[in-house]
Image (cartoon, coloured by chain):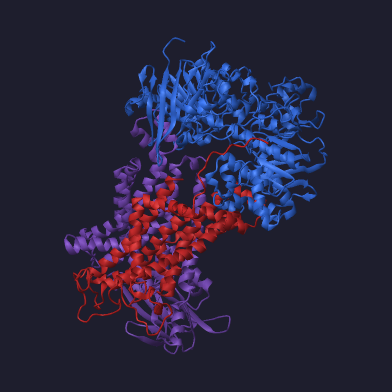
Amino acid sequence: MVTAERSLQLPASPSRWDRFKARLQPLVRSKTALVGLSLVMFWVVAALFADDCLINPACWFGSPDYTPRPLIARYDPYQSFRGAGLQGPSAEHWLGTDRQGRDLWARIIHGARIILVLAPVSVLMALLVGGTLGLVAGYFGGGVDEVVMRFLDAMMAFPQILLYLVIIAALGPSAVNIVLAITIAGAPGIARLVRSLTLDIKTRDYIAAAQTRGESPWYIMFVEILPNARGPILIDAMLRVGYAVFAIGTLGFLGLGLPPPSPDWGSIVNAGRKFIQAGHIWDALWASLATASLVVGLSLLADGLSEQLNKYR
Amino acid sequence: MNQQPVVSVRNLAIAYETARGLVPAVRDVSFDIHRGETLGLVGESGCGKSTVAYGLVNYLGRNGRITGGSILFQGRPLVGQSEEALRKLRGNQISMVYQDPMTSLNPVLRIGDQMTEVLTVHQKMRKDEARARCVEMLRRVYMPDPDKVMERYPHQISGGQQQRVVIAMALLNNPALLIMDEPTTALDVTVEAAVLDLIADLRRDFDTAILFISHNLGVIARVSDRVGVMYAGELVELAPVQEIFANPRHPYTQGLMRCVPRLGSSKLDSVLYPIPGRVPPPHRLPPGCAFEPRCSYAREACRAERPALRPLRGTAVPHMTRCLFSEEIDPKQWRPPDDFALPQPANDGVTGETILSVEGLKTHYRPASASLLGAFGLGRRDVVRAVDGVSFSLPKGKTLGIVGESGCGKSTLIKTIIGLEDMTDGKAEFIGFDLRRRAGQRELALIRELQMVFQNPDATMNPSYSVGQQIERPLRRFKVVPKDRVRDEVIRLLRAVKLDEHYYDRLPRQLSGGEKQRVGIARAFAARPDLVLCDEPVSALDVSVQAAVLNLLLEIQREHGTTMIFIAHDLSVVRFFCDYIAVMYLGQIVEIGPAEAIYAPPYHPYTESLLAAVPIPDPGATPTHIRLQGNVPSPANPPSGCRFHTRCPRRGLLPDGGRICETDEPPWRDAGEAHRILCHIPLERLRTIESTGK
Amino acid sequence: MARFLLRRSLSLVLTLFLVSIAVFAISEIAPGNIAINSLGNTITPQQEASFNAQNGLDQPVLTRYVRWLIGSDWQAQQLIGNPVTRIYDEANNRTSWWGVLPDGTLYQNKATDDGNAIIRIERRLDPATGQPVIREVTLGEDAWTTNAEGFQVYWGVDTEGRAAMWVKGEQNEAWVLTQASWKNTKGAPSQYIPLQYGLLRGDPGVSFRTRKPVAETIIPWTLNSLLLAGIAFVVVMPLALLLGLIAGLNEGKFVDRFLSVTSLIATATPEFATGVFLIVIFSSWLGLLPGAVVVTSNQSILANPAQLILPVLTLTLIELGYVLRITRASMVEVMRTNYIRTATLKGLPRSRIVFKHALRNALMAPITVIILHVNWLIGGIVVVETLFGYPGLGRYVLEAALFKDVFAIEAAAMLLVVIAVGTQLIADIIYTYLNPRIRYA
């Protein structure tokens, strides 16, 4: 028997709860991340409890005699108050009303729902498409890589706004098309990131070890490589959700967002900006503020997290 | 030496501010260095050697600071000096040479600019004058073509030359103190030898005090006048170089010397004794002697208090030690601990049947061309002949070592055998299987018998999965044991590599380098392969861990009769570990044979140069002056005739200066007992060369 | 280095070629019908067919792509037998296509209503006044030639800027959209080639919306946009690089935290929101600055510089934040490298370390990233121009997209891509200049 490196007393394996706490640590330690998280959480809660749909089973199954009861939103976002158009903030209408006399607070709160569904969904789609392309290009290399990257370069040379304009102009404004446009515009960037991570990770010895076990390329890509790229990908995705909110807002502002009467934030700004010069700044101001706070929140969160992760690497 | 020391360090303590609070990295370090004297600091990684070096110039980063003690430089205190006062000393009176020359030079400035500014800033010298000095200094460090080098950018010269530039730059102002932090660690053994020669020359010519840091006992023995041994942030022994190598009196120093193989010793006639345990992290130091938990002499007194650095009693030599019992522990009286059993000697009943035969194997590749023209197949494409016609055969149960400088193709060779690279040409047969296809296309039965152990402990394990999951994978994939017994088998394997079952759920980041390497070995042996390829498995490990891992590999091999191919750049390790050795140069084997035959004349001139370059951990050894010039030529465009002719130091032995070497490929010369040398020089002539193995 | 740039330029040309196909494909082949998109869905099939024929939309995709890219005049000239040219008429502020007779006289053609005779409208400049003089000549029987199928045909230039083929005796009708309504004209040609010089020669076609060549509007508006972006660039670059370096050098200190967080907020806020905030503050509340850009047709944008302030500020804020952050990150990274350690331990003064050793390395990453960011800037320009009503390329492309003005979208898209890709080449050149590892590869 050869003497072992006598193992020094290591602390016992941490419990799940300890690990969870350890994961949360960077969040709590960074003030930036904490501020970002609060902003994002505000909108998430607002979106969830705008009305009672989440807590009323009648809503879940689409019961015909169900009408949503407003909670946080206070009013129905589509309800017009007669003779109350273009009002400023008041006790009755916290943020004022728009031209049709609809309550702006209700519309903004309900707008959060739209954006908080569309943005993550489009990023998820872009992750699926871009991530797969990047993995394949990076792992196989050679001709596959050359073709994929040339194609993606051409896509990236295309200004994103143009892509949005052309796609939405050709297909018409709708939730599906907005998701499609953002997926197409976002996928090349994700593919590049994943490819560069893959190129780095695939030189590690444990990948060679898997190859010498004769593992299939798909096993290596998805089981051996992908889990080790998740950190940067997640942070990038968080930033991208921010960009997606940004982009969806911009589309709405340009008149390519969800068609009226949807309380899409960008569309509210677009409708409201005509009244700014006339002195009614509220529509544009509140919707702009909402969009900005959500994007800033997501960016702060991503920034604080990545800084903490780098510090402890 | 009665004059005032150049630098005098007393009770130096350095700590780093971390999330865990103030963590001491260096404690209670004291030493003097006089003019013209070299103090070598040696120790394993994490022992605080570099921290001492950077502490001297007070460059400890944002979170490091000197927490105690004093540093007198030429009589003046350094601690507490203003940044401006320090700046005037740095690069002028105190200069440094770093481990990694490539990253230490600014990539966007010409070498000339980087050198002259040292003079223009400190001496206010005129530009042209400074330039002339720099060229002169480059000449002093034997830089070929110094005028041209001044105009170059760092990436345009080789690593060895970069280090010469850094050394020349450090010497420009004729500093009183020169600090060298692992200056040869990043270099190939042949380049290292040349740089060490240079340092030895400069030591004679400049009257400078040198602090030389290295983890390599051989290098330290080469350059030092006195040697300080560091352990866990403390200086544990300090003595003249002869004394410390002949008569080490601290258990850690003794342990270090026992775990490196001497050049020429073999597993058949010697044993490595690793130091058990590992260096304690600075935030969890034991209360008493820092080395006590790993020390085989430890007694109650050692646990009670921290010993001081004190002179050794009963000797005239100035020998300091930090052990309570130094006088009693004679290295010559040392016996291995009771629970240390020698690995069983190799079973002589090995049949000797050939398990792997390789014939004319070639691996060429085209470097990935980034150019668009390349994409259309229009660009000029060089073929890199990484492995270019290699033949050998390997009997069952034996170990073949492959040595050579980096870039000689040794890694590519084993990657081709295991199927990570495409074989361009040739034949390779392994227990009846053809090895031409890549690993992904090979049948499971073959894959199972052929496994690999990797170099870098930090990359050998997938950071996302636990130790258990990673050892399980080959067990399940190759169906080594029934499904319900997989966990037991993993635990058995963990025990076999001296890790207990608690490691099952650990993640790689919770493991030390040596432990990761053990898991890598367990994973490779999980499928009970016939042939294991080891690509520098111990190069990245500290010497004490290296010894343990080598012993582990030996033990497993002897138990299972596994055949191995073993790559390492440390020629002593290869000699110790292997039965046969192949010496590779530029994709070809130039000499192959039984290990003992390779390390004794007749040598191939390349083997001779490699052996001459090995730093010997014995200050009495006289260095031979066979040195290779230049770098390995590009494998994309190898020299004609004998590939070694551009650097061969022995061509003079042939008539007309070896013209034939440039034109004709050399013949294989059979020196008997399967020992063959690829050289134009006749064996009788090669036999007259003296042995370089001391 | 030359080889590197050559390689980059080649790949750039290839990229542009691919993009041109993509732009063409998305806007012309993709779902939707140009005729219906531009004329509304009340048109009859005859009207649609006639519209398509007149605009060359009945041709195969490849033909249309070639004409769009390199023009159709050279093709038409062979059929007509005379050169064709485009002139600009100041009197009625429009351009028109004419055939050129050997003596230099310009001409257009139309047919009599029964289609039996061709009329040539000749245009000469009166030598005395310099004013154009128009007269109509009815051509004789010998004007007709017999084509391969045995029809008697005449190739000429019609009055709507097209090469056209009349077949003798064919009483062809065409639907023409006039200012007010659809009009059915007789004596129409049976085949058309819309005349254009092609994208590569600066003529991307005629806008369906304004009936004017796209180039006429797009060029001045692009210059307006470049003015806007240029001012923003001149403000942003030095300021952002400087602040970024300051933040990077003071990593972790208050200055750094302040600049980092502020710039993050500035760059994360969408342009329309920033713009709305600025308008609300400076225009609605303080009444200091105009909240919209008002330009009459013959007035320069610069006539009232105050109206440029808010658009420029909006663009500046978002770009400033972005560039600052990149520069800061790069500086922080460089200050941690071994060569900065070497420089410090060489005893160099801090100023020399920063300016000589760190700066060039630290600028390498931001300069490329920033210039690649032009894509992003373009998005900002579209929003800012729309918000402030600024007559620029961004607003043009948005309006073209909203009205589905195909040739205008195509032209604007290609222009934007050329700008984006061109700046990438510039980024490469700057990067190559800064990085000797590429220069002396």
Q: Quadrant of residue C409?
A: bottom left
Left or right: where does residue B400 sit relative to residue A275?
Answer: right
Q: Please tell me which residue is depicted at 42% across the width and 68% down the height of the picture.
A: C410
Q: Colour of chain C?
A: purple
Who is closer to the viewer here, A305 or B370?
A305
Q: Please tell me which residue is depicted at 81% across the width and 32% down the height of the picture.
A: B674
x and y percentages locating residue A194 in the rendered image: 51, 55
Left or right: where does residue A184 sit relative to residue B567?
Answer: left
Q: Quadrant of residue B124?
A: top left
Who is closer to the viewer here, C15 or C287?
C287
Who is closer to the viewer here, C332 or C220?
C332
Who is closer to the viewer here, C13 or B206?
B206
Give the chain ID for the red colour.
A
- State whether residue C127 is above or below residue B39: below
Q: Colour of chain B?
A: blue
| Residue A173 visible somewhere in the drawing | yes
x and y percentages locating residue A7 in the rendered image: 57, 39
